[in-house]
Image (tube, coloured by chain):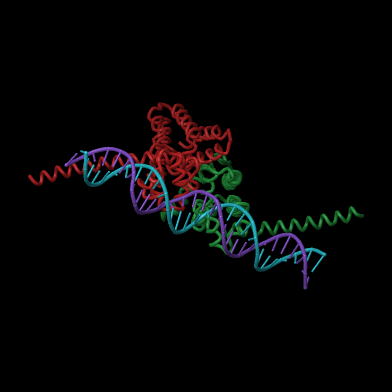
Chain colours: A green, B red, C cyan, D purple
Amino acid sequence: MARQVTGAARRVADAAEVLRDEKFNARRIELAEAALETLGELGFARTSLREIAQNSAFTHGVFHYYFSDKLDLICCCVRHYKAKCVTRYDEVVASATSRAELTEGFLAKLAATLQNEARMHRLWYDLRSQAMFEAAFRKDVLEIDKSLEAMIWRIAFRYAELGGNRPASSPAALYALFDGLFQSALLKHLAGDKTAIAELLDEVRRLLPTVC
Amino acid sequence: MARQVTGAARRVADAAEVLRDEKFNARRIELAEAALETLGELGFARTSLREIAQNSAFTHGVFHYYFSDKLDLICCCVRHYKAKCVTRYDEVVASATSRAELTEGFLAKLAATLQNEARMHRLWYDLRSQAMFEAAFRKDVLEIDKSLEAMIWRIAFRYAELGGNRPASSPAALYALFDGLFQSALLKHLAGDKTAIAELLDEVRRLLPTVC
DNA sequence: ATTCGTTCTTGACAAGTGTCAAGATTCTGG
DNA sequence: CCAGAATCTTGACACTTGTCAAGAACGAAT
């Protein structure tokens, strides 16, 4: 009986701890989301914890309470953001019933992303570059890169499938291609090039049938 | 006659000024070269003028004397470095007399670059990302990107030519593809992945005949 | 050799940085 | 309602940052 009681007590305690952890984690994500605003605006190099705090509803101490240090915060930010990213095209892939439909859905989302989420994406490229210097970023960045590659692969595979064949290139090459094009278009777009988005769409439209 | 004298004096003065300018510029490049050491080691975000000075034979004041500010210095650095970069494959392109020869020459240089100049290239990717935030970098970065695209195009065009046809993709797409692959391989290489270089070479070897 | 302009050194300044700790506040279980 | 834990605020710390100015060292032309 004593065992049962302790068992039950343990279970209650565990449940409480899990709840606390969940709450803790939810708060971390709230903070990360606030931090992303400033990071997307200024970039990694120019963003300080105080700046993040001032542009948010939180004080700078809270960030130190929830994150062991600056790198911890930023890792959490990028992980959280890209978790949403990698599902961006899933609905299009799932619902498309023809190559044309998939193409148009993909291109539309691509254009919208470039238009509306330029700041978040430049942050991603920033952090991926930082990972080349800062070992603490590498694990997360490599993981995210992999899942982005998989995302592109799902699109390409479905596109090929809808034409009754298989993609002509490897997942790595396809990701490199689209990522490179996107990165270049993003830079041009941010530099004020009004034709950057349209040119990207043209290029992708031309490319899809030849690589998939 | 008075006109001739002033004309001659003007010419002498001009020559002196040109000489001073050349000397001034040579010094700037010396300093930029020293700065590149530290920048390649630490990245843009973590590099300060003092750190640069300490890792070099110069004092931090000299940098302020030759550069109007930090951005000016770093612009000069990246411009100087990439000026050398864009000619890297020219000799291979000029001397190759067959597709196999061009392929092997290209791959060898690619591997050597990744192996020996990883630090400089991660700096390039870092600064290209910074350009998405910092307008002052954009002009130089876009220009360099263009010349790198042209460099890749020269290789691809020659490769196609040696097979008696034309590249199958646009310059932009080819650059995006190779740049994306290189960037990914660089990150993996820096993360300690011993197979990253070999995998890049395999991928490129496979790709060349299909895209050119 | 003296003078003058160029080049460089040194030290200082104000602003901003990450980090932390002491205490205020809020929440929660008993 | 209350004690103790969790959460948050505030202010301080040691340090680094870019910038600059005063003057030293140097070189070349007179």
From the viewer's perspective, tell me whether residue A207 is left or right of residue B23. right
| Residue drawn at the location 54% of the way across and 62% of the way down | A54
Q: Residue at x 43, y 36 (%)?
A: B156
Residue A189, image quadrant: bottom left
Q: Residue furthest left?
A: B1
Count the marks: how many?
0
Is residue A161 in sight in this rendering?
no
Q: Nearer the viewer, residue A112 or A46?
A: A46
Residue A5 at what x, y percent from top left?
88, 56
Q: Is residue A98 visible?
A: yes
x then y, percent, for residue B124: 46, 43
Q: Position of residue B89 (x, y in %)?
A: 41, 33
Q: Residue at x 84, y 57 (%)?
A: A9
Seen from the viewer's position, the closer of residues B108 and B54 is B54
Quadrant in which the N terminus of chain B is drawn? top left
Q: On screen, B140 above or below B109?
A: below
At horizontal 13% and vertical 46% (from top left) the residue drawn is: B6
Q: Which of the two residues, B33 or A18, is positioned nearer the viewer here?
A: B33
State which quarter of the image contains the C terminus of chain B: top left
Q: Position of residue A141 (x, y in %)?
A: 58, 46
Side (left or right) of B101 relative to B21: right
The residue closer to the viewer here, D9 or C23, is C23
